[in-house]
Amino acid sequence: MEIIPEVKKNLYRLEIDLAPYLYDHHFEGRAILPAAEALIIMAKAVKILYPEIHVLCLSAARFPRFLALMPDAKKQTIMIKLKKGESDVSVALLTAVKAKTNKISRMIEHAFVEFNNISDSKPAPVSFRGAAKLSGACISIPSETIYRELVVFGKAYQNITGDLSVSSSGALGYLSAGEAQADEETLGSPFPFDALMHMACVWGQRFADMVAFPVGFEKRIIYQQTRKEGDYLGRVVPKATSEKRLIFDGWIYDANGVLCEEITALEMRDVSGGRLRPPPWISG
């Protein structure tokens, strides 16, 4: 990623690399930038421009619009806007839309997040023993079925492994950090976090009759960065549901039961306008 000198105060133009694996992440036939990758891009910019800011505590994230990737391109230009506080930085990932005069007429926001220094008082996470239990009547869905019929992404983004257990109390399953050459030095591998959102999507199709995509979260704390080719346990728990949105808390643990990530109030919505529908069999 290359940061080009600021266009104006706190607004920068970036050239991002479009690695081939990114094109395995798509929506209605278009390759789109994953939310997990957008967060890495914004975190890298903060580390370059404000190295004193801790980037492993993220809050107030939102993903209002998909960013379509240019077909067959190796690089793509985006914009980022930063606002620094005393111990935090907020970042928006934008694209510029030009008018017919070839001048920028408006900026479209695709992602936003705040990076905060972690305080000494950490929230009490769900223990590994508690997370590894799923109450209620469960069904088990093979990962092959998930990625063929429920979350239809290419190979690089098929990182739920084995069978996913789903009940009214949540979803539980194993996650892979994949083999693709993604940045794992900034926030850890993007793939376990991305796959955790797949788990929430599957739950929504089973219990809310909705194909939901992530549109934001309240907080994500990375205690231990996930690494390429690692295996992890993921758990999501529904906290609030309605016809328009689903809210989950989630956790990612390593093979030794150590908490890697905690996600609070992950919000999922149907962003297709009802065009995407769960297959009939998933609702039972």
Image (tube, rainbow, N blue to C red):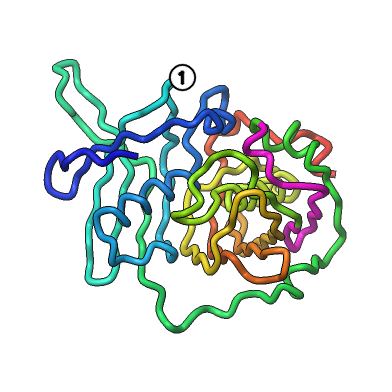
Q: Which element carries disc 1, helix, strand or loop?
A: loop
Q: Is residue 17 magenta?
A: no
Where 255 sits versus 268, above or below?
Answer: below
Residue in front for this viewpoint, 266 or 72? 72
Q: Is residue 169 magenta?
A: yes
Amino acid type at circle 1 is Pro
Question: Whole-percent x and y of residue 30?
Answer: 52, 24
Q: Is residue 67 left or right of residue 12?
A: right
Q: Is residue 266 left or right of residue 117?
A: right
Question: Whole-percent x and y of residue 61?
Answer: 42, 55
* Label 1 environment density (alpha carbons within 10 Å; few <14, some 14–19, many ≥20): few
Which residue is rendered at x = 47% and y = 52% of the image?
Answer: 216
Q: Where is mark 1, residue-wise?
A: 71
The quadrant holding residue 264 is: bottom right
Helix, strand or loop: magenta stretch: strand
Q: Which residues are magenta?
A: 155-172
Question: Whole-percent x and y of residue 207?
Answer: 74, 50
Which residue is rendered at x = 44% and y = 54% of the image?
Answer: 186
Q: Quadrant of the N terminus?
A: top left
Residue in front for this viewpoint, 47 or 77? 47
Q: Is residue 94 left or right of residue 84?
A: right
